[in-house]
Amino acid sequence: MTARFISLEGGEGVGKSTQARRLADALRARGLDVLLTREPGGSPGAEAIRRLLLEGDANRWSPSAEALLFAAARADHVAKTIDPAVAAGRWVICDRFLDSSRAYQGAAGGIGDAAILGLHQVGSGGRLPDRTLVLALGDADAAARADARDAGCPDRIGGREQGFHTRVAAAFRDFARQEPDRVRLVDASGDEAQVTDRLLAALADLLP
C-alpha cells in the first residue's frame, strides 16, 4: 500500500489533537499501518525543544526565535520519525506541521511566509504532507473549547490575545485557497464522529 503523510492543522480549540487520534484509529480499522505523531515534538530532540517553546511567559521568545526553534524541532522530527516511517510504508498522521509555523509565526507573528518556507527548506528539505486537513471553527466556539480544554492554564502560545488567534485562523483559510490540492478546510463543528467522517471524506482520493 502507498504510504502517506497527512497533517492536521487549525487554531486553538478546534479539536485537532482529538481528531488526529480518531483519524489514526479510523485508518487502522481499514487495515493501514499508522503512526500518530505531533509538533512540536515527535522525536527525542524535538520533544526537548517542545518544552522550551511551550513553557514560560508568553513573551519568552520573539517570533523570529520561535520560528528558528520550530524549524529545528521539525528538522529532527522529519529526519528521525516522519521520513523513516513513510519509507517503511506507514501512514503518518501529524498533529501540526509546517503550516502552523506559517500561520503562527509567519502570518500572526509577522515573520512572513517566505522566511518560514526558507527555514523549512534548510531544515527539512522543503518536505510537505501529501494532504493537510485544516479544522475550521468560528472564533467564539473555538475560544470556548480552548478555555474548557485548558481550564484557565493555556500554554504560552495558546494564551495569547484573541486578535492573534483570529489572524492565525485567517492564515489557515488563505493556505486552503492558495493550495487547494494539498490543503483542505474541514468543518470542525458538531460531534466528534461527524468531524472524523468529514476528515475521511477529505482523504477519500488517497485511501486504498
Image (cartoon, rainbow, N blue to C red):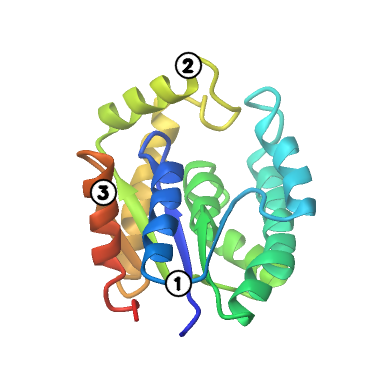
Q: Are marks 2 and 1 in contact (CB under 8 Å)?
A: no
**20 or 136: nearer the viewer:** 20
**3 or 57: nearer the viewer:** 3
Give the Cα separation between the discs numbered 1 and 3.
Answer: 20 Å
Residue 32 tag number: 1
Residue 160 tag number: none
- As drawn, the residue found furthest toward the bottom would be 1
Q: Which residue is mark 2?
A: 151
Give the Cα separation between the discs numbered 2 and 1.
Answer: 35 Å
In the image, 127: left or right of 194?
right
Picture coordinates of residue 101, whole percent (x, y)? 55, 52
Q: Are marks 1 and 3 in contact (CB under 8 Å)?
A: no
Q: SS for tag 1?
A: loop
> Which residue: 39% across, 34% down?
13
Q: Which residue is mark 3?
A: 195
Q: SS for tag 3?
A: helix
Label total for image:
3
Picture coordinates of residue 149, whole percent (x, y)? 44, 25
Quadrant of residue 50 in the image?
A: top right
In the image, 167: left or right of 97?
left
Of pointers 1 and 3, the one earlier in the residue sequence: 1
Q: SS for tag 2?
A: loop
> Which residue: 52% across, 24% down?
159
Q: Amino acid at mark 1?
A: Leu
